Amino acid sequence: MILNMKSLRRTRKPAAGFSLVEMMVAVAIFLIIGGAAINLVSKHAPLASSAQNQAGLNIALRNAIAQMEIDVSNAGTGYYPGANIAEWPVGLTVVNGPQATACNSGTTYTANCFDTLNVIAVDTTTPLAHPSGATSNVSDSSATLFVMPADSTTVTDLAADFHKNDWVMVLASDGSKMAVVQLTQDGKVAGGKVNLNHNGTDKTTFETVWTDSSGVTHTGDPFWISAQHISTTNNKLGSTFSSNDWVLKLNPITYSVDLSVANNPRLIRTQGTNQDVVAEQIIGFRVGASVREGTADQPYNFYASGPSDLSGCTSNCGYENSWSQIRAVRISLIGRTPPNGDPTSKFRNSFDGGPYKIQGASVTINPRNLSMGDQTN
């Protein structure tokens, strides 16, 4: 049989696939669409990051406020075992920074911008004790306080709970007076009693120099309870106590702003040797207080070192000399998103002109055990 080659060539189907031209057109379209998508994502990525940073900042501020609410609302608790004292002598103290006009240079802040809040808490792990003897004196100069356990704790075990640099409060059983001293030696047993050697309480001898977390040096006790900061005519400080009174080891809580990392001011909670970061990127921490005058609570004031309202002051009155009359505190906290955000952003906030977002939170806290007696006034 003879094949007709021309007939075979006419009936063969063309091969399937894309031509080179078609492939190049498809690649070009893909590149255009892909480039547009990448450009769109790159433009929205900073927005997503900014939203995430703001959400994180909001959560951090809420957590910080919640932690301070817990601590401050419990200020003054645990001083009197089994007793309900209507007016507690001290539960918290406030140290206001100078708040100079130029406390910050653009986005960099100094210690002058921030306040310090001290919650005077009792160390619940140390057994309670009583002053030894019918009359015990807490001297204005260096001295020794003799104490005895208030329960079945041995004097040896009690002495082991007190160490050099610990802070101790001696408190009258009726809340009428108190003394706060810092130990100069570890507790020791002598003559069947626990001997607590301490610094004096008088402002002329109580000259302990200390440096806060922001690097600022102060003179006097770091919690501002001693006579160094208290008017001699309006306080509950005393020097003579009886065997019915109480000796308590303190474990105060201090809130302050740490500036050791210049571009990240951090709100720090310090209690004993424990130091925890409560919130980062804090650029505002102000604490004000309302004090009790007679039967009325005074307006909130953010200037503790001003003259006391009890001295006749009627405007910008302070409360360093009236800390036993503090009835409530107002805390204002300002934070920022990380300052190393989008360097190309033209955004500038109206607070300090920085290229980041700002959020603020504030709360008014009533330390419940500092105002129990107000109902009867």
Image (cartoon, helix red, strand yellow):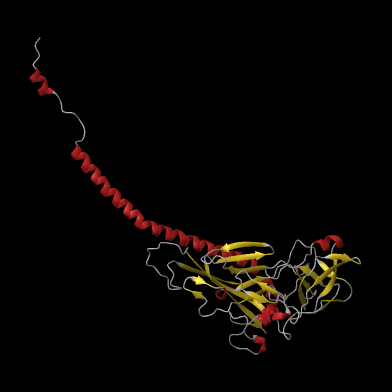
Inspect this view and state whether residue 366 appears: no
Question: In the rendering, at what x and y percent does residue 182 appear?
Answer: 76, 71
Question: In the rendering, at what x and y percent does residue 279 appear?
Answer: 56, 63
Question: In the rendering, at what x and y percent does residue 292 appear?
Answer: 66, 81
**On the picture, is 314 further left or further right than 228?**
left
Q: At 54% across and 63% down in the image, what residue appears?
A: 280
Question: Of 107 and 58, which appears nearest the observer?
Answer: 107
Compared to 357, does 6 lie above or below? above
Question: Of 277 and 198, which appears nearest the observer?
Answer: 198
Compared to 49, does 199 lie above or below? below
Quadrant (top left/top right/bottom left/bottom right) for the C terminus: bottom right
The residue at the far right in this view is: 191
Quadrant (top left/top right/bottom left/bottom right) for the N terminus: top left
Q: How many marks?
A: 0
Q: At 80% across and 70% down in the image, what residue appears?
A: 247
The residue at the far top in this view is: 1
Question: In the rendering, at what x and y percent does residue 368 appear?
Answer: 66, 71
**On the picture, is 314 further left or further right than 357?**
right
Inspect this view and state whether residue 23 appears: yes
Residue 175 placement: quadrant: bottom right
The residue at the far bottom in this view is: 312
**On the picture, is 101 further left or further right than 73?**
left
